[in-house]
Image (cartoon, grey):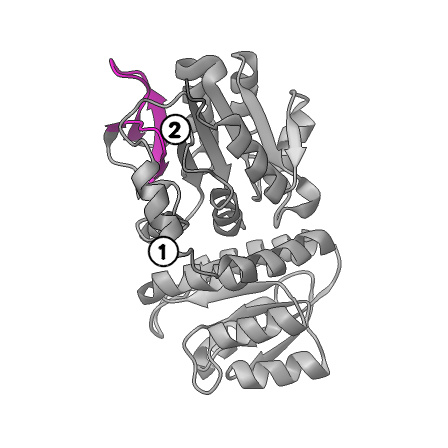
Amino acid sequence: MRELRALVVDDSSLNRRTIAAILADVPGISRVDVACDGADALRVVESNPPDFITLDLEMPRLDGFEFLQFLMERHPLPVVVVSGLSAKENVFRALELGAIDFIEKPQGEEAPLESLRSQLVEKVRVVQQLSPLALRRTSMGGLALGADVPPDMQSRARETSVLKRAPGKVIVIGASTGGPQALLTLFRHLHDDIDAALVIAQHMPARFTSTFPSRLDRTGVTRVSEANPYERLACGHAYVCPGGRSVEVVPSDRGPAIRVVAPDRASHYVPSVDQLFRSAARVLGDRAIAVVLTGMGDDGAEGVRDVSQRGGMVLIEEPETAVASGMPSAVQRSGIRHQSLGIWALGDLLAKLTRLTHG
C-alpha cells in the first residue's frame, strides 16, 4: 500500500492533537499536518497538498462547508468528516459537497478513543485503495448533488407517484463506505412512474439512519423513510434499514412486505446486506433486483448468489469508480452473472428496468 500524508483540520487543539497522534501511529501514514480552520487548511493544501484530510465542520473564519467547496473546485482530495452527534444533518450536507465518509467524534476529554482509532484505520485503508477515477467521480458528483431539486419537480413527482400499489419489482440495495453519495446519485436518476419499491441496507451508525432518509427524500421523486418494524412495500417508496438492525423481505396477502429484525449472529456487518438479499430471493424470485454499491468488505457477495439462482438480476457499481471497491469486487470474484456499471449508468438502467408500463 502507498504511503499517505494526512492533514487534520479542527479548531479544537485537543481534537487536533488526538487525531494527529492516532494517525501518526497508523501503518501507511508518513506525515501528519494540522490546521486550525478552513482558511489555514487551504494554505497547507496550496503549499504542500496532502493525500487525504480529516475535517471538522463547525469552525471560525472558513468553516468545513466553505472549505469543501473551495477544495473540490481547486484541488479535489479525499475528505473524511469527523463530526459530533449534534451535527447529523451537517454530515450529510458535507457528503453531498464531496466528502467521502464520516466518523463520529468522541465527546469530552474522557471519551474512549478505541472507536475513533479503529474508524480512522479503516478510512486510511479506503484512501489507500481509492482510484483516481473514484476521486474524480466523488468530487464532481458531490458538488452536483448539493444542488436543490426544483420545487415544481418535487410537486409533480409527489402528485404522480402511485404509493399504495404493490410494486412490480423490488430493488434491494447494499452499500457501505461512500454509500450516501452513491445513493443520492442513484435516486436522482429514478422516474416518477417507477414500478418498484426499494429497500436499502446501508452500513451506518444507528444515530444517523433516522436523518439519512430525509436527505434521500429531497431528491423529489421517490418517497424515502426509515423502515418500520413491519410494513407492506409500496410502489414508488424506498425504505432505509434502521442502524443496528437488519431488514428482510417477507410475503403478505397484498404483496411483498418488510420487517425489521435482529441481525444474524453469524453476520459481521450490520445492517446485513446478505440477510436482505437472501430474503428477497426467497420471496420475490425473478422480481428481485440486487444492487451492490461502494463499500469495504464483502457484505452482499453471498446474498447475490441466492438472487441469481432464483432468477433475479444482480447489478454492481463498477469497482474502478466506486469510492471503496471491496463490496462490488467481492461480487465479481463470486463468479455469478452480473452487470457492472458506473453509478450514473447504473441509475439510468434502474430507471429503465422499473419504468411503469401503461395500458
Residue in view at x 55 percent, y 39 percent: 347
Horizontal side, residue 125 vs residue 203: left or right:
right
On the image, the x and y values in percent for residue 303 come to: 51, 24
On the image, the x and y values in percent for residue 336 come to: 65, 20
Front tag of 2 and 1: 1
Residue interval drawn in magenta: 231-260
- Give the residue at the far front of this rendering: 359
On the image, the x and y values in percent for residue 128 come to: 68, 56
Q: Amino acid at mark 1?
A: Pro
Horizontal side, residue 234 vs residue 196: left or right:
left
In this view, 341 is above or below 103: above
Q: Secondary structure at mark 1?
A: helix
Kindly indicate whether the residue at mark 1 contacts the one at mark 2 (C-beta within 8 angstroms). Answer: no
Cα–Cα span, label 2 and label 1 = 42 Å
Q: Is 228 a magenta residue?
A: no
Horizontal side, residue 358 vs residue 49: left or right:
left
Q: Is residue 168 at least partly visible in the picture?
A: yes
> What residue is shown with label 2?
264
Q: Which mark is residue 129?
A: none
> What residue is shown with label 1?
151
